[in-house]
Image (spheres, grey):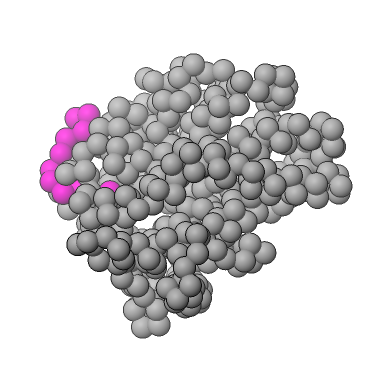
Amino acid sequence: MSSDVEHVGLTNVNIQDNPFPYYKEQMSKCPVWHEDDIDLYVIGGHEEVRAALGDIATFSNKPSAGGRAANMDAILAYQSVLKEKGWTHLPVLQRSDPPEHSRYRKLLNRVFTPAQVKAYVPQLEEISNSLIDAMVAKGSCEFVRDFALPLPGIFISTQLGLDPSQYPKFRRWAEAMLSLAQRSQISVEEAIIEANVEVEEQHFIAGEFEKRRANPGKDLISLLVNAHVNEEGEEPFTINELMTVLHALITGGFETTTGALSAAMLLLIEHPDQMEMLRKDRSLMGNFIEEVLRFDSPVQGLWRSVKCPVTVSGFDIPENKSAMIRFGAANRDPRVFENPDAFDITRANAKNHVAFGFGVHFCLGAALARQQMATAFNLLLDRVAHVELAGPMELPIHEPSFFLRPMRELNLVVKGA
């Protein structure tokens, strides 16, 4: 890694592809640091991350005017397109704090209860088996496109009551919705293109909202559109609220699980001894999933707004600044995880990772993500006797992203059991 790494930081696409040496270097100095080029304070230590996530009075999810985003002109252009042609975003779920946050969370918690997630297993198995049928018949696959994307894509599309065969279109919408957050160097022209893609999604979804008002079903869109209608004192969600909640569900339903599935497969291929161990002892499946999430967190970090001056591990952070809770760094903290850069499915404390956050904003889809991974890899290990890379992977392995880990492609040779 070049000597100017610490001066470039998290906006550097090479560091985004493999941020872990950078985390190690920064954490060796202090578990909190400042990204000079974008005036961003990064909290990377495991203990410090958990404390910040629990202190919503200081580290708020509400957007801040602090910092100096590298793509501010692009952000303003994107917002202008939404305001003119569609619906602007509101601070809901990950961009709000209690008590407002609780209103949305209460409703969506019904969809992701442990019992409800278990009820999804037959559908997840059906989708997984169909995808495995195709890859085994062909003898090869591009795992991201042929498995890691369609499994969560088809599932979330079905749960939303949308045509599952259209999941590639929904994925394109998710890419547009995340473009500003992922691409710090996005141009104004590119932002306008992406904003118009989201506007396309918004008008499509608006039509679905109207259909569900007239003829509600059991799908998630029906639940959201008709929420609180019969509850005294509660107002239905506005169109802007509905759009923003769907924004969160679509982006979360596609990108993060796709990233986790892709990382898990690559890690097993890179550690064949551990793949064989997992084949023989499926009781390790849960810990395997936790170690994947620790070792290569699909969400590397999320933004917070600093509402009052605070000192974290001796590092002063002024008020009205932007901070990032960096899960990827916390999950490699050597103070918590022995030999943190080693992938080990028998690691005793793997479950102590913070890949899903902590506190009131703990990821509401965590149980579903774990179940999708467990279903997928139990069936893959049952039905695929041998899997290997089809050839050397081209660098960079991941698409540029400030906070996610979207793998470009994973070409495999597979042999059925």
Above-or-below relation of 82 to 341: below
Residue 175 visible in rendering: no
Above-or-below relation of 66 to 123: below
Whether residue 312 is in magenta: the answer is yes
Dominant SS type (magenta): strand
Q: Which residues are magenta?
A: 304-316
Whether residue 307 sits left or right of residue 386 in the image: it is left
Whether residue 218 is in magenta: the answer is no
- What residue sits 41% from the left and 25% below the top? 352
Whether residue 288 sits left or right of residue 332 in the image: it is right
Whether residue 215 sits left or right of residue 157 in the image: it is left
Residue 128 visible in rendering: yes
- What residue sits 74% from the left and 44% below the top? 129
Where is residue 338? Give x, y as percent: 46, 17
Q: Camera-side residue: 240 or 351?
A: 240
Q: In the displayed image of the protein, which residue is found farthest to the left?
A: 308
Q: Which quadrant of the structure image shows residue 66?
A: bottom left
Where is residue 413? Give x, y as percent: 81, 41
Where is residue 90? Give x, y as percent: 30, 65
- What residue sits 74% from the left and 49% below the top? 131
- What residue sits 37% from the left and 20% below the top? 335
Numbered label tally? 0
- Quarter containing the C terminus: top right
Q: Camera-side residue: 28 or 49?
A: 49
Above-or-below relation of 26 to 343: below
Q: In the displayed image of the protein, which residue is found farthest to the bottom?
A: 84
Above-or-below relation of 140 to 265: below
Where is residue 15? Give x, y as percent: 49, 44
